[in-house]
Amino acid sequence: MKSTPLSLIAGAVALAAVTGFAALTAPGEGEAPEAKAAARLPVERSSLLCPAPSSSDLADTTYTSFTPEGESDGEAGTAELNPSVPLPADDEDPAAGKDEEKGEEKDEKDEKEEKPGADKPVVMLKDAGKPVTADTSESDAPALIGTATGRLAPGWTAQQTTTTAAGEARGLLGVSCTAPDTDFWFPGAGTAATRQDYVHLTNPDDTAAVADIELFGPEGALESDAGEGITVPPRSSVALLIPTLTSEAVDDVTVHVTTRTGRVGAVVRVAENDAGSDWLTASTDPAETLVLPGIPADATSVHLVAFAPGEDDADVKVQLMGKNTTFAPVGNDTLHIKSRMTASVDLKDVTRGEPGSIRLSPVDGDGTPVVAALRVVRGKGAKQEIAYIPATGPVGDRASVADNRAKGSVLSLTAPGGTAKVEVTASAGSEGGEKTVKTYTVKGGTTLEVTPEVPSGLKGGYALTVRTQSGGPVHASRTLTVTEGGIQMFTVQTLPDDGGTVEVPAVEQDLSVLDD
């Protein structure tokens, strides 16, 4: 048999990488076999970054790490959340030297606990299907850098939940720890005198990252020389007070974070005087149609902030997908968004006592890609509290959210297209209990709000996993409520597809079997 030239084989392999499939056939062997489609395989490694939780002495933070049960048959692996900067292995007592001089022995019970160092994870997950938690009350708790491998990598999620009972940062601050990237959009921040908003940047790598921060208000770009060329040292985190990046005071600002070199995790911590605080995560990538799911039924105010990053203006329809149907808010059925200018509209108590979700879509035909987020208020006066809902992608095959509790967790499911069926699994509890599984049908164009069935015999917290079974796309979010001092503090986390699988090109023939 005549040998196949190596160049032909290399070209076919290159084609496989580009198109997702390939069939290798030597010249003269007749017709090529039918091409095989790319296969989807579980990812083997995942990365997550959690911002520094709080600088308040009154803050209590819970970290929850979870990987849903899957079908991966790879190595067992681990999932670890480690401090972003090395901490001392021991916190020495200043009086220790005096004790030694006096020859006194220190009782082990009086020694301070060893703080986690670079080689000691804050949270370590070893098994899928059951969350692991850890708590801290340290005001200087660092950002965390996480890595999951083997069977724990597909679908790995981590939640950071901080309760601050009093002070300017009062509130329940929840965030699903984010994957590192190079481009983030945050509509909904502010630089007004009433705001103390910070953008947190965390670098997971062993080399420095350089980031730029752009700010856009209702009149366009805000002058901000301080936002250029920000160095984020290796395996470290920096927090920048957004109002100090510009001299212009604006209520509604879109923050754009990009990196020149390296990658970072980015998230914004919003704090408003007399209103509360929470984390604002990035909007999904700019798109013509967006879904912002999970406005609580008792929301007293809903504020929409949107931005068109391209060169064209955008005209979008604003629709509320309610409990029974989709309708346009009276007087706010459309929104004009000028290019590279932040637009906003106060939808007030648009849900009228029912749960709902917002859909933005082009007014006429093809639209202009936009990003968006909602500022949601519950309560009034001194008892009001805020949370943010960014535009998010659909659940897809699977999505999870950790740190759910026996009371206070509500799941919102929205079907912007056709009717869909989803399976919701409440995992085993972190300290005990058996998982429960229930199926829900979400009518097209509506929002279904459900209180999940907690695990049987639940002890500790649990995770929720949503899987699409049939029908159109489903967008989801989870609202967690904790009552402190008579205030219903709450936070909302969206559930986009967890990206637990990746497309791998299929190759028809093993090169090792080719003869000379």
Image: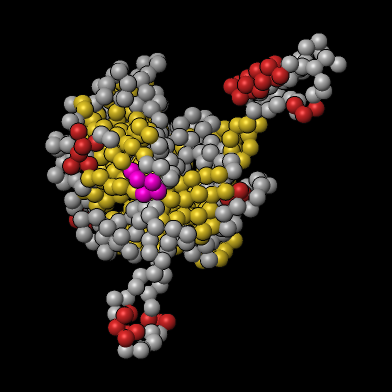
The part of the chain drawn in magenta is 232-236
Quadrant placement of the C terminus: top right
Residue 512: say if magenta: no
Q: Is residue 428 visible?
A: yes
Residue 103 pos. (x, y %):
35, 89
Residue 71 pos. (x, y %):
66, 46
* Direction from residue 19 to residue 81 in the image, left or right: left
Residue toward you, 404 or 191: 191
Query: Picture quarter containing residue 330?
Result: top left
Residue 478 pos. (x, y %):
43, 48
Q: In this view, does 71 lie above or below 101?
A: above
Residue 491 pos. (x, y %):
35, 50
View extreme (bottom): residue: 103
Q: Is residue 367 above or below residue 291?
A: above
View extreme (front): residue: 101
Magenta stretch, main secondary structure class: loop
Residue at 31% over, 25% down? 309
Residue at 54% over, 57% down? 125
* Direction from residue 430 to residue 3 in the image, left or right: right
User: What is the image's colouring?
Assistant: secondary structure
Q: Can residue 387 be seen in this view?
A: no
Q: Is residue 193 above or below residue 170?
A: above
